[in-house]
Structures are given as structure tokens and as C-alpha cells.
Image: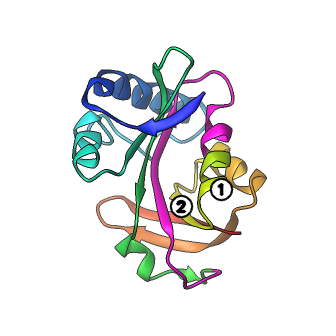
Amino acid sequence: MRIRETVEKDLVFVDAIFNSARDFMRLNGNPHQWNQNYPTSRDVAQDIKSKRAFVCVNDDDIPIGTFALFDYEPAYDYIEGAWLSDKPYKAVHRIATVRKGKIGSFIIKFLEEKYEHLRIDTHENNVPMQNLLTKFNFKRCGIIYIPDHGQRVAFEFVK
């Protein structure tokens, strides 16, 4: 596996990855974090233009995971709790994978090796993601609010 920037031809795989992730979330007690209108390949197409869309690909260069990486997240300005650091960070959004292998772990490990400071949020019912983040030394910092998406549990990694 490897991580690379998302390109236009990957978009056909991205919707399938998001659908797989939605199914996994529903099966694991989290039916409301994402709906059929969000996220989609349209969101990723915008991220491609901004150079913030990435895919995890298999040995045949087929996307099996996706995520977006932002330099700043306005919703993180207010937190019920406290961030660990005020230094510049990368915000990770919309991590999704197909349901086989350790793709989520591969993505998180890649991000921790490449960046010294990361922030991410997830739905309170997304226990598998919370467990993954905790496994990789992210600390739960509090609650943030995403416009049109509601309350989320905020995590941070500082090297």
C-alpha cells in the first residue's frame, strides 16, 4: 500500500469507498454520521482542486482508502475541552476505506510519520474510529461543532 494525491480517474472508486464506509458505520452502531449526500466524489473533486485529497492505493494502484488533509479547520477554533497545542496543525477529514485489511491503520501511521501535529474529529457513535485513533496515540480533547453536521468528538496528535 501507499498514499498518493487523488486524481480525477480515482473518483469512480471514491464513491464505492464511501459507500463501504457508510455500510460499516451502520453495522457498527453509527448510522447517522454520513448520509447518501455526504461525503461523495463531488466533495473529493473539490479537494483535488485544492490539493488536499489523498488516496491509499493497493499494489495495482487501485484506491482502497481516501482522506482529505486541510491546513486549518475553522470549527476547531472553539472546543469544549482543550487542545494539547496551539501550534499549526493538519486537520484530517473524511477518512474512509474498503472493509478489508488494515487500511485505516496504514493511513493513520502514514500521517503520524509525516506530520508532527494532527487534529481529527468523529461522531460520538463512531467507536471503531475512536479506538483506532486512541491506538495510534491520539488524545481525546473534547467536543467541537461542525456546521450542518453537529457535535463531534475531537482528537489530537502531537509528536
Q: Amino acid at mark 1?
A: Glu
On-image quarter of the C terminus: bottom right
Q: Which residues are magenta?
A: 84-107
**Residue 133, position in %: x, y?**
68, 53
Query: Which of the two labelled residues, at mark 1 and mark 2, occupies the earlier sequence position?
Result: 1
Q: Secondary structure at mark 1?
A: helix
Horizontal side, residue 51 vs residue 151: left or right: left
If the image is split into quadrants, where does the N terminus sit?
top right
The structure residue drawn at horizontal position 59% and vertical position 39%, both measured from the top left corner, is 29
Determine the image quadrant of residue 119: bottom right
What numbered label is drawn on residue 120?
2
What's the residue at 47%, 63% (across, down)? 91
Q: Which residue is mark 1?
A: 112
Whole-angstrom CA distance, mark 1 to mark 2, is 12 Å
Number of labelled discs? 2
Q: Nearer the viewer, residue 14 or 147?
A: 14
Would residue 94 be found to the left or right of residue 26 on screen?
left
